[in-house]
Amino acid sequence: MSSASASVAATTQRPREELESVVIRFAGDSGDGMQLTGSQFTQAAALAGNDLATFPDFPAEIRAPVGTTFGVSAFQINFGARKIMTAGDQLDVLVAMNPAALKVELHNLRIGGLLVLDTDEFDERNLKKAGYAASPLNDKSLDKYRVLQLRISDLTMEAVKESGVSKREALRCKNFWTLGLVYWMYGRELTFTTDWIQRRFGKEPTLAAANTAALKAGHAFGETAEISGDISGFTVRPADLAPGLYRTVSGGEALAWGLVAGTQLAGLRLFFGSYPITPASPLLHILSTLKQFDVVTFQAEDEIAAACSAVGASYAGMMGITSSSGPGVALKGETIGLAIGTELPLIVVNSQRAGPSTGMPTKTEQSDLYQAVYGRNADAPLVVLAARSPADCFEVGIEAVRLATRYMTPVMLLTDGYIANAAEPWLVPDVTKLKPFPATFATDPAGFHPFRRDDKTLARNWAVPGTPGLEHRIGGIEKSYDTGHISYDSANHQRMTNVRKAKIDNIAHDIPAQVVEQGTETGELAVIGWGSTFGPISRAVSNMRGEGFDVSQIHLRHIWPLPANLGELLRGFKQVIVPEMNTGQLVTVLRAEYLVPAKGLNKVSGQPFKIGEIETAIRAALEQ
Amino acid sequence: MNVVPEKLTAKDFATDQEVRWCPGCGDYAILRGVQNALALIGAKKENTVFVSGIGCAARFPYYVATYGFHTIHGRAPAVATGVKLANPELDVWVVGGDGDMLSIGGNHLMHVVRRNVDLQLLILNNEIYGLTKGQYSPTSRAGTKSPSTPMGSVEQPVSALVYALGSNARFIARSIDSLQKHMPEVLKRAHAHKGTSVVEILQNCIVYNDDVFADITERSIASDRQLQCEHGKPLLFGKDKNKGLRMNTQTLSLETVTVGENGVTEADVIVHDEKNRVLATLLAALEPPMPVALGVIYCDPAPSYETGVMAQVDAAKAKAPNPQLNGLLRAGYTWTRS
Ligand code: SF4
């Protein structure tokens, strides 16, 4: 290993090595701008035509003490010339801006992987804060990796000195210097980021100049320096994606837009009542900028009021939507019951996080499936949907509005912290081509009562205040099936309970039959999942199929009711594995519903599944 | 052809539902008062919505022939906020008891008032939990014996109207179930006020807390214990309207004086100014043996919440007329694969 800063000299560039895909993780202190660096690199990769998946991984504390391991913030991106399914199991490249980042992240780097370090940060104080007794730069602990020891702080200071920023401001440009270097490594254009810097710092020209200078200096360093002998530039060609117009989209954006699109297709206006909670808040932030689409957002005093305001808005004829994470959804439970009892449309978005209780707010988990399907007092069925990826949130958002309005029911829409914050390229749909599903309001007083039902859907008619002649009273007390008036009659309660259940059960026939994502419709082994495990399951199944294993992949969007053909489909496989980021929830539902011997593959470490973990389970099942 | 709408009477606001309060309950009188008020203000049935939570008082919507939503315990103000935001044209009334509004729903009450959502919020205060069979409530006086406090409550009560003022209410008023002429007039003022109008109505629970307001309503003392607040008029009370309230500048409190005694003249009596928040706070807090303030105690309008929300929506729409979702999805960085 040699310190590269010593060998800055014009050299002949070695030819770029071609790679199919790369996993890179930027890690540093919370204040080092790693999320920004990562998202800039994401855009650049997308513009270069790569497929990609990202995984922002940040601490729960807003500003953890500088230099500590619990203050480490990281952003991982997997980009490639092939279809990318996950943010990547093992790192090819780790950029560690301080000793704490190295300490926390090193175990993710594959042997022989590239480690980029800012050696200026490896002083005694920082080493101690990170818990290193001795500097890892001086022992043999890093020998398994290719290490680029760079004096990034110094080099950045040097690069920005012309711009006239303070020392503190200069050091804050480190991330752009590093980004410039990484751009060089993968042959990326700087223009996307230089344009961004101009927009971001337009009003502070010195900061704009400093950050641009740092970015360019990092890039130039790569071009001109012969970095430690064995590092060359790489080429990652564009992926073979379907033709069309693309953008990157986060789960929060795709869901907001999907809900707006669905509401428009239903011919309604959107009401969004929410209370801030990690990691669900992006939806509130995004929707509050969409008022031009007749969106009304309401930051309520608490989770209960958020849900209640949405129910009130639905009662008055809007599409009422509320969102939260598991603990907040627990608080909304009674209100969801009211919407079930009064049969009003309502969408409840749950961006799941690790629990119980406060748990780990910024870490992802899928442990609210029971809560969604069963988690209310009494017999209180509703629809449960789950998005599989950031972009998938768009379609699931539309489907949630369709089912909520067509069946006059609450719909629980499950995403998770990973989906909400991760981004991926998205083939932008043409919303004018989507099929409308207009909601209808009752207007005719003849024979009207509020719980008159559609023969086919069993949905009650929706009569909104302001309609002359349809004045009526509804509430949480049981209603007479025949008149809609309050009723304490026991036979009537049986009948109403039955019809509420039948209404939801029947939806199984109004959703697409379950398809097999990969593989045959019957066989040795099916791997069935839901939500954000889609990526790793897909890649694992495709890898194993490549090796000749008889394994199929099934992935659910409709969790409740389950698709009508699912039982038969599952019975066509000798074995069924259900990978979930919980201790076994869907697997229990499937066993209960279909009496199939499904087995769980479970993980609750706050991190997504690794492809290898699922491959191992598939191998074990088929080789036993 | 112009159809002149028939003027609705109180009867037109009654439903065919059998009213299920205990015989002699003060809620009957309040229902009558509200129905009279609806006729008085010329309310349109189709544009009127009653929203309630849970409790005896919360049964209200079933008995008013308008739109009605009987929701869950304590949450009526939050549901009503959604209704009003969805359709600001609607005339929204929230009805609840002291437990519903000040215990489980105390938080929502604070915030609906603070936001100043345009609705009428009636707190039917009987100082007890009726529907759950007589436990003490957040407005029960210290020492109240109830099934859950057999040795007497050791809690201090909250004053509904002082709480509302503390939450920045712009309209507070008070009436009593038995004041059948007074109540519709107060409700009319509440209705005319744009913003949250908080009206406390003292209600007798004949079963669990009978005569708890006797120290205000008992015929022999009523005139000494009931103070009608009228804007611009001196705060006089008593059988002969010769008692009044004077500001004691030493103790910064209200004191009772008798005009014509000890050199007191009518000029010493405070003239009610319903825009005076400090005075309102003092009046709202009066309790026996002082007279209890009735009528419109405070009314100082401020912009209502839904107006502000819709103004922002309208501004966004004016700035981006006819927005296309396709355009939104394509804004920012995009690239084309061929
Ligand atoms: S319990 Fe009291 S408040 Fe409730 S209906 Fe009976 S008398 Fe009225």
Image: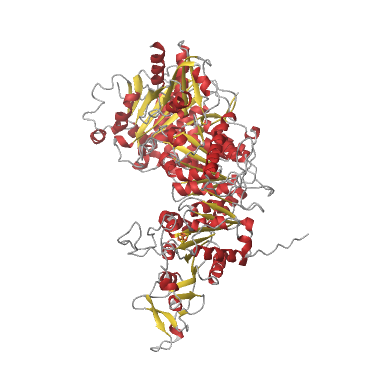
* Figure quadrant of residue A441: top right
The quarter in which the N terminus of chain B is drawn is: bottom right
Which is more toward the observer, B232 or A496?
Answer: A496
Q: Is residue A615 above or below residue A62?
A: above
Residue at x 57%, y 67% (from the top left corner): B188
Residue B131 occupies quadrant: bottom left
In the shown orientation, is residue B59 left or right of residue A9? right
Foreground residue, A96 or A576? A576
The percent coordinates of residue B82 (x first, y second) are: 53, 51
The answer to whether any part of residue B304 appears in the image is yes
Q: Quadrant of residue B264?
A: bottom left
Counting from the top left corner in percent of width and height, residue B87 is at 59, 52
Query: Left of B21 or right of it: where is A603?
Result: left
Question: Viewer-proximal residue, B312 or A344?
Answer: A344
Residue A571 location, x and y as percent?
49, 18
- How are the residues colored? secondary structure
Residue A187 seen in render: no
**Which corner quadrant holds the C terminus of chain B?**
top right
Q: Residue at x 53, y 55 (%)?
A: B51
Identity of the residue furthest to the right in this view? B1
